[in-house]
Image: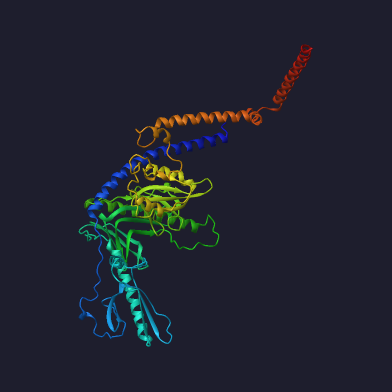
Amino acid sequence: RRSGRLAANSSSAADAEGAAERERRQIQLMARRNEERLRELARNSGKKNRDEKTAKAEELDSYKRTKDLPDNVLPNQVKVDMANQCVILPICGNPVPFHISTIKNVVLPDPDAAAYLRINFYTAGMAVGKDAPENIAKLVQKYAPYATFIREMTFRSLDSHSLTTAFRQISELRKRARMKELRDQEEANLVKQDKLVRTKNERVPRLSDLTMRPVFAGRKTQGNLEAHSNGLRFISTRGEIVDVMYPNIKHAIFQPCENEIMVLIHFHLKNPIMVGKKKQQDIQFFTEVIDASQAVDAGKRSMYDPDEMDDEQRERQLKKRLNEAFKDFCRKVEQVAKKNGYSLEFDIPYRDLGFSGNPHKEMVFIQPTLNCLCNLTETPFFVVDLSNVDHVHFERVTFMSKAFDMVLINKDFTKQPWRVDMIPNEDKDAIQEWLTDMEISYTEGPMNLNWKQIMSTVDGDDRFYMDTEEDEVTPKEAGWEFLRMFGKDGDGDSAGSGDDDSGYSENSGDEESEEEEEEEEEAFDSEEESESDYDADEDLEEQGMDWDEMEREAAADDRRRKRDGADVEESRPKRRNRRR
């Protein structure tokens, strides 16, 4: 019969062997990915140099001629021209126009004997601020070396009504200009989509009574989803239309209702589209199987209650029917796309590989698919394209903590990494095994790192993925190897031989492992010898001796001791005689 201690030792040895095998594969994988990233960056740098264009500042022309100024401007009056986005200020009795984007803020102090209006402008020599228009920041930088700037202007008037009206109009005009700028920024990177070609003379695949996320104007958006020749069209009950083109779909995900409250279809887009007034890159259509806000009955109900059994049976049938309807719709959409020359395939999340984590200040269940790592049930959506992940680092990996954090580093070093916090320690081995199978390198460490500083340093290092310094002789850690907690195996042997690029040798690793095993066996034997007195009772327990056998053993022990004592006494007189 095998003892529990031996079983635990064998399981821990198997886990250690699996971790060592993963570590060996990770070292080889990181070396290979460093070479691939070097080639990829070389290609991208060539394209970037060809396509790079310097954005120039756009000059502000409120009025092209003096005749274009409003006719009803008085000599000493603050006038706001809402149509031309301009504020006309009196300077020495002359009306001077200022574009609204040059005004940093406007202040109206509490009136005393007279009313005051203070206007502050964007100037050189001081922080422009994040809220400043992009064009104004470029203009300030352009004219800073030689131009004179007006920092502040204050106007006084005994008539508080005129300055209060001007203050209100300037504030409203600044608000409109800010909203217009934000809207232009939202639409600046939008790629023009093709027009939807509706299918005619054929039956169109359709799903009815769906809810779309994100919503239009903060209201629940319900409607129907149809699949046409070159895209899908969602028509809400209020007549709002959203078109999703097949060429713009990067990842399509179908998540059936398994231990969830909804069945859904999710589209992660290549280029964002406008939904209402916001730019969105993730569009989702779902149907709730169970109402998320359904109140739980406070009274106790029996497990044999026929009403409850009927409810559960209806719920199971509804789940099955909805899963089949969504699955059939996905299959028809794939056929329509393939028929019209588009490639579209729906992924299904692997629920058995899922784990709990906190990507957006809330604990959710995160599941991997073939191409993504995602949580689609809760908002905001968490979708990470694995093709954009350069490396994964595990933080707070210690024996003391019950959870760890996972950082997914983007290949674009100008963007901050994705984070998933508070992952239970039980899921670490499964996640690392999945990352190794997906050929994504990972490292782990005991503390949280300052990723903003790390990414800025890495972004400015042209030799980040190379294993030598600028002199091409001094060795250094290539890529993300500096995050490795224990270094690489076989560094001592590979340092003397330059044949192995990865710094790892299988023979040296085997020899080191054999030496370590011999040392462990010697240490174990010495411990057994030193603890032989304490192990005597355990040996008896293992042998299973009864009382009679133990008494016979004790009697034989006594006889042996008496015989040894008699021999000692007989030898003593002889020694005395010899001395005499």
Report whether 173 appears left or right of 572: left
Q: Position of residue 392 (x, y in %)?
A: 40, 47
Q: Is residue 513 above or below residue 315?
A: above
Residue nearest the observer in this picture, 238 or 16: 16
What residue lies at 36% left-to-right and 83% top-to-bottom? 163
What residue lies at 56% left-to-right and 32% top-to-bottom? 2
Residue nearest the observer in this picture, 119 or 42: 119
Residue nearest the observer in this picture, 471 or 539: 471
Q: Position of residue 428 (x, y in %)?
A: 46, 45
Instruction: Confirm whether residue 213 shows in the render.
Output: yes
Q: Position of residue 214 (x, y in %)?
A: 35, 62
Which image quadrant is residue 263 in?
A: bottom left
Q: Position of residue 379 (x, y in %)?
A: 40, 60
Q: How many marks?
A: 0
Report whether 68 appears left or right of 496: left
Q: Residue furthest front?
A: 146
Which image quadrant is residue 559 in?
A: top right
Q: Is residue 391 above or below residue 152?
A: above
Q: Where is the C terminus found, in terms of image quarters? A: top right
Q: Where is the N terminus found, in terms of image quarters? A: top right
Which image quadrant is residue 97 in?
A: bottom left
What residue lies at 30% left-to-right and 82% top-to-bottom? 90
Q: Is residue 196 above or below residue 347?
A: below
